[in-house]
Image: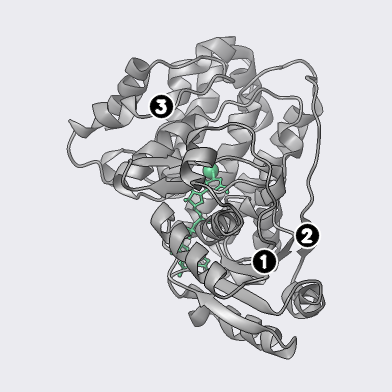
Amino acid sequence: MNQFVFENSTKIYFGEGCVREHLNSLLNEYGDTVMLSYGGGSIKKNGVYEEVLAILKEAGKNVVEFADIMANPTYEKVLEGKRIAKENNVSLILAAGGGSVMDCSKAVSMAAAYEGDLWKDYWENVGEVNFEPLPLGVIVTASGTGSECNGDAVITNEELKVKTGRDYVKCNPKFALLDPVYTYSVPKLHMVAGSFDILSHIMEIYFSGPDEDNVSDDISEALMKNVIRNLRRAIQNPEDYIARSNLMWDAAMAEIRIIKLGKKLDFECHQMEHQIGAYTDCSHGCGLAVLHPVYYRHIYKNGISKFARFAVNVWGISEAGKSEEELALSGVEALADFIREIGLPTTIRELGVTDKSMLTEIAYSCNIATGGYKIMTHEEILEIFEECY
Ligand code: NZQ
Ligand code: ZN
């Protein structure tokens, strides 16, 4: 395994009732004014808003609201949050939502504590930074991104047509409350897309070197099987606690940095998806579902043994009578079949790219990841996009 340093400072409270049980005492550790941030209103429909607000009042906090955080949060929205946080001298940001709410709140926690141009100094020029963001706590309502236990905030700069993220250890939430029951109300498409995002995070790590015997690959295989099994179960019954709790912890396990240790990491599909998202505002998990099989058909020859191992260990495909190449391809096709089975899109058109001529501009705007089995060129990314059209 390669060298690594492991640090993860988020304190996680997991399980049914954890917000009721722990939020009040957690709030004691912070000042008087809490900024409650949330999205387009799902927390008002499922009772989470009422529950959290009552606990905030009980704890004697002044509450300032930062509402209407959109899916794929924009930098403009971050600046709005920064203004609210600064004007009200906020001492804790409490985010209740999915990845978009958590990411936007994380970005606000940085922007409110940073004096310069955060976009330029942080997202655009990925150099050294050293500053302490405002404290952030999160209440997760949708499983997928794992934003609850890392320092990543993925933000869209609409003006520049760039969607990008960056993991900064000081940006980890101070605490994260994960109640699987809160995810029961997530609509099916979001649940499936979020679960595919989990699978994608694991695959982006698994399909990268080093490939010698290592803990990460073994944990990753167990996690992928767990996601597949429990997503099927949650589709059957959205209120299945076992399924929802497994998916919630899978999401955290994929992004808590543990399985990334010692691995190079690919994340090229994420780079491509983020730019499709910057142009179309599509759902992150849906974008990944369209790209992964086509990307893997493109690169599998550069990591053929690993793709064969994926077929056998994750999808249970028999090795009998198959060459290594046939086995490798059968794993990719099992993934493609699964995407169809769970009802995610399979073409870039379904993501909102309605005009084929847009593909070139999007392809050439993508970052090139360097840790995967094959380093892409922009021409190859365009080929992949065209195959997905
Ligand atoms: O806005 P509200 O009303 O809350 O509705 C949301 C939204 O419409 C809804 N939702 C969330 N919890 C719900 C619920 N609806 C009913 N009941 C609930 N309990 O679900 C919709 C999607 O929410 P969103 O937060 O956008 O989804 P997700 O969690 O998939 O987050 C996606 C964002 O995270 C970024 C993505 O790029 C995208 O911008 N990512 C963040 C990462 C990170 N920070 O580590 C890594 C990922 O790879 C990803 O890039
Ligand atoms: Zn993702």
In the picture of the structure, the residue carrying the numbered disc 2 is 12
What label does residue 294 carry, if any?
Answer: 3
> Residue 83: x, y in percent?
48, 66
Q: Residue at x 59, y 45 (%)?
A: 198
- Vertical position of residue 384 compared to residue 21: above or below: above
Q: Nearer the viewer, mark 2 or mark 1?
A: 2
> Residue 117: x, y in percent?
48, 46
Q: Mark 2 or mark 1: name the one nearer the start of the chain.
A: 2
Q: Secondary structure at mark 2?
A: strand
Which amino acid type corresponds to the residue marked 2 in the rendered image? Ile
Decide if residue 120 is on the left or right side of residue 360. right
Which residue is at the front of the view, 223 or 115? 115
What label does residue 180 carry, if any?
Answer: 1
Disc 3/disc 2 C-alpha distance (Å): 36 Å
Which amino acid type corresponds to the residue marked 3 in the rendered image? Val
Query: Does residue 289 appear in this view?
Result: no
- Disc 1, disc 3: CB below 8 Å? no
